[in-house]
Image (cartoon, grey):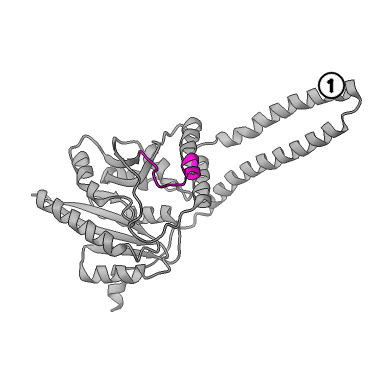
Amino acid sequence: MEKELISVIVPCYNEEEVLPLFREEILRVSEEMTKAHPQLEFEFLFINDGSRDKTLEILRGYAEEDSRFRYVSFSRNFGKEAGMLAGLENSRGDYAVILDADLQHPPKLIPQMYEYVSSGEYDCAATRRVSRKGEPKLLSFFARSFYKVINKISQTQIVDGAQDFRFMTRQMVNAILDMREYNRFSKGIFSWVGFRTKYIEVENTERAAGTTTWNFWKLLMYSFEGIMAFSTAPLAISVVFSLLLFIAALVLMIFAIVKLSGTLAIICLICFVGGLQLLCTGIMGQYLAKTYMEVKGRPKYLIGETEETKRKER
């Protein structure tokens, strides 16, 4: 019987409190799967994204105790996008599954995901959050608005509520790795590469332990990253504003000629035009900044340590 390796990829940032709970759960799930499917083998690849707590120390211990546990530790914090990329690049499996360590992505769904993908009907199984219970209402409103906006202005359609929790074939993983851009927005990349995807609807799950590092500002910036990564529509805003201002200028000229008293209106218009010019310049500047980062060709992450390099030091 030919063996099949599943790479479980887990980005980590300050997860010392939840790692023991996650390890217990992922080992339970993997043992159940290997009993049901003897051809399956597992590797557990943790990406330490510059954690400041004891995450790296815990991962070292796991790797010493069990050879199936591997880790890649960054030289500093590079962000979750870099963590997911590093996981995919360093995975060895015939299949790869990405999930968070905080158990908001329940490992118990992995067997169901495997059944969908191994059947040959799908190349990917992913979770889709259908409720945002427990999440601040303002955050939920902006999240839903983001999906509506990006799906209207981009040719790449992103499923509302789609999560990073995905079980993929090696073919799909390789397709994702072929996309080498520096400014990465994985939700868009997952959709852009295509492939047949089965979405599993799930309820919102609270963290098992620890505290999240995501806040409203970070999520807002992340949404801007996604819009600029998969749409050039914001650049068209300057053209639309130019047409509107041209019409407004004509109306104001007529008003000034007829009333002979348009000083206040002209001042308001000058301020309005100045603000719009700054807005349009800022939008174009953001695209230019993204291009600047791409052209420099810097690595997306730097590795400080892995279980293999640590073993060689001994």
Nearer to me, 260 or 120: 260
* Residue at 35 percent of width and 69 percent of height: 56
Farthest residue toward the right? 260
* Residue at 24 percent of width and 36 percent of height: 122
Give the magenta part as a residue range: 130-142
Classify 252 as above or below 87: above
Classify 301 as above or below 142: below
Residue 312: x %, y % from top left: 28, 75
Farthest residue toward the left? 1
**Residue 230 appearing in the image:** no
**Residue 42 appearing in the image:** yes
Q: Is residue 257 left or right of residue 188?
A: right
Question: Which class describes the residues within 10 Å of circle 1: few (<14), some (14-19), or many (20+)?
Answer: few
Q: Which quadrant is the C terminus positioned in?
A: bottom left
Residue 214: x %, y % from top left: 46, 54
Q: Is residue 253 left or right of residue 60?
A: right
Nearer to me, 58 or 42: 58
Residue 299: x %, y % from top left: 45, 58
Nearer to me, 232 or 61: 61
Q: Is residue 234 left or right of residue 96?
A: right
Rendered image quadrant of residue 198: top left
User: Of the residues shown, which amino acid type is indicated by label 1?
Assistant: Ile
Badge 1 element: helix
* Residue at 89 percent of width and 23 percent of height: 259
* Residue at 17 percent of width and 38 percent of height: 119
User: Is residue 131 highlighted in magenta?
Assistant: yes
Marks counted in the figure total 1
Rendered image quadrant of residue 209: bottom left
Farthest residue toward the bottom? 314
Residue 78: x %, y % from top left: 45, 59
User: Is residue 172 highlighted in magenta?
Assistant: no
Q: Residue under circle 1?
A: 254
